[in-house]
Amino acid sequence: MSYTAWIIVTASLVGLSCSLIGVFLILRKMAMMADAISHTVLLGIVVAYLITKELSGPHMLIGAIIAGLLTAILVQWLNNLSIEQHASLGIVFTTLFAIGVILIATSVGNAHLDVQHALMGEITFIPWETVTIPVLGKIPEATLLLGVVLLIVLICIIAFYKEWKITTFDPALAASLGIPVVFMHYLFMSLVSVTTVASFDAVGAIMVVAMLITPAASAYLWTDKLITMLVISAIFGVISAIIGYYIAAWVDTSISGSMAFATGIIFMLSFVSSPKHGLLAKYTKPMKSVV
Amino acid sequence: MSKFVLEVENLSASYRKNIVLEDVNFRVKQGSLTGIVGPNGAGKSTLIQTLLQLHPSLTGKVEFFNRPFNKSKQSIGYVPQRGSVDWDFPTNALDVVVMGLYGKIGWLKLPSRAHKRLAYEVLEKMDMVKYADRQISQLSGGQKQRVFLARALVQDAEFYFMDEPLVGVDAATEKAIMEILKELKTNGKTVMVVHHDLQTVEDYFDHVLFLNKTVIEHGKTSSVFTTENISRTYGGKMKWAMEEGSHVVDTR
Amino acid sequence: MWSILASSNFQWVLASTMILGVAAGMVGLLAYWKKQSLMSDALAHAALPGVIIAFLLLGEKNLFILIIGAAISSLIGAFLIQWIQSATRITEDTAMGMILSIFFGLGIMLLTIVNRSAGGNQSGLDSFIFGQAASMVKSDVFTMLILTLVVILIVFLGFKEWKIYLFDPQFARGLGLSSKGMSVIYTVVLVTTIVVGIQAVGVILIAALLIIPSVSARYWTNSFFCMLLLSALFGGLSGIIGTYLSAIGKGWPTGPFIVIVAASFFVLSLVFGKEKGILVSRLEFNAQRKLLNSQTNANANTLDSKGVH
């Protein structure tokens, strides 16, 4: 496959995993939790690096899951101490992120890991670092990782589809039916962390947040069915990735920034023209009823 | 039928710094239809939530069917207040009813056609079939309440808790809901309902539980629903409650 | 290191981070009671494209102009968040997350273009992401000082209006206080604090300076006025200590150190605070439980003794 094709495939994988997870994120009213985790994952990666002295996939993943769960647990803990969700989230993620940045500045140096890279990603380098897989042949390491993560995400969503649905819609009922609401919450947070860290290297934290939230929010404007919302969100995720790449190539700029921006374009289009909740529908509907 | 299906001993609970339930003791007989009444902030919702372990208890013992709550979960149905969920959630009325079956369907399985048929039947009973495909935010208050009730019915529980099911619903829905509750009762199910309208207590419930932080009085409506108990429960609002009470007596 | 600390430029920088901390502490308290702590995070990220566009238009790094660009971009972000959540069923946190990431993405796009054309990182705009207080020059410091002083003055003088506006906007309107007007002033001081702060602390962490001191202050007092003063104190101290710490190493970013200091104050407040601090609450809870138990025992005893008779 060509260089461009690999970049588009990688970005599309990010788009798919993130936009699927994102549907449940926004329905659970946890969009800002995604923002928080995308920042704190940095700390997980730095600590994993300081302990193992290498920047390899598995270590980073484990560090990131721990950091993500730590974020969720700390936020929950502060919340139980009667600090509102918005404030506890703000305290936890900025503090953990600050620790991460300080560790990089003081003990890692700029040699292998720099914050800017983590925030903005460097998808342009991805096709160069390849591994050889028996059947598939030579494929970029990051792409492989993202493929595996997408598989995990898909399996978890399909296997526990109705549990996600009910714990999201009505946790009290779910608990009374004997469904482990707390376990599902932390499983979900783990999925968010894994997806975030796998996407991190390729596209950076900001793009992850955009991909997690925006396609799902756009899809929310088009449908009233959960399953349809998942499908539309996934499609929007992939389209954003592709459009983003071509915008970046066209004006010669940051690919991850353009992809985040592309999710915004799709949202704007949905916001204006969605048949049910869009602006045009709002202004035309009353006229129709008059006619 | 005089078996006790719920026994509560010395239950207490707090909300932030304030104790909202204290030394709550009562026992409920099988096949009874109980109205829980009390002023705002008397701890009615908290009582239900504490019984169902959705709110932590400070002290006390709760037994359903002579077993602890965790072992009897499957036979208990709960209808929360309507405000407790996000009505913009992408789902329709039928789907919400099917959710009542999720506990029984088990892990890794999707609802089958049989489950959907069951949900459909219950919707039919609630006269809601024509709204089965409707997104839930487009239902009226009464229709939402019917969906919630249908979701509880489909669980086929032995014991039902309902938190203010009659608030903000139209007269037809109120009548329909009460029909269903009476039917449940005749089928030997036990029902406890948080209720706010003192005028209808005598028509609707055969038992009444007066609650204000603790149980003021509990027993057969015919013997405990008295002006005296009402004023003991409502305390400062005594005057209003008295009028309300006498009104009830008048209408009989 | 000591030579840096003694230099007059450093003292100016110190003064500006201190006063920034004070302003952020005060404005953050307003945001906290408006339940909008995370809004500051969204608006800070949304400021980035404005900074870059201002630089592109002007071609030089004039802090005042950059701040105006940042403010315009933040305000557009704030407006969009408001619009999206009022026009659709999308909730506020989702709208904030979207605006934050999309605007930041746009900012990064533009920044990449600027860095490419300006040759490397010479524009120095990168410091807007993490904050580099030490890189500020005297004119930057003056701009910051003046703007933050104005913010502090507005919050301080309108103290009782803020109080009533935050606590009960309906009632405030009844008193003839325009809640729309207050909202506008609130947004303006919030955005000003954010955009002034991003040079020193960076767009990612300025939110911390607004959120953390205000929550810490809650643990010490129940009076709004005292809370305002404490929040300002925590913010100011975090600014000073954090800037000192970051001056120890070469090229260390200022923002993260300020945040760590603020977080330390928070942890101390959380544990030892006299209002709802963990220690105090634990003691109260135990006392309550003991009281309940002894009461029920006493009841049981009286019942028993009745039974005997």
Image (cartoon, coloured by chain):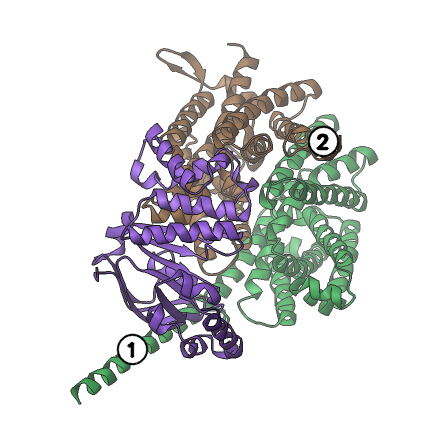
Q: Which mark is residue A280?
A: 2
Chain under callout 1: C
> Relative to the observer, which residue lies in front, C138 or A202?
A202
Q: Which mark is residue A51?
A: none
- Which amino acid, by three-letter code, is at mark 1? Thr
> Relative to the observer, which residue lies in front, C113 or B246?
B246
Question: Which residue occupies 47% across, 38% down?
Answer: B93
Q: Which residue is mark 1?
A: C296
Residue C150: tell me if it is visible: yes
Which image quadrant for residue A272? top right
Residue placed farthest to the left in the image? C308
Q: Which chain is the one coloured green?
A: C
Residue A199: tell me if it is visible: no
Q: Is residue B162 above or below residue C227?
A: above
Q: Is residue C66 above or below residue B115?
A: below
Tell me the distance, in whole angstroms, between the alpha carbons under discs 1 and 2: 65 Å
Give chain A's shade: brown
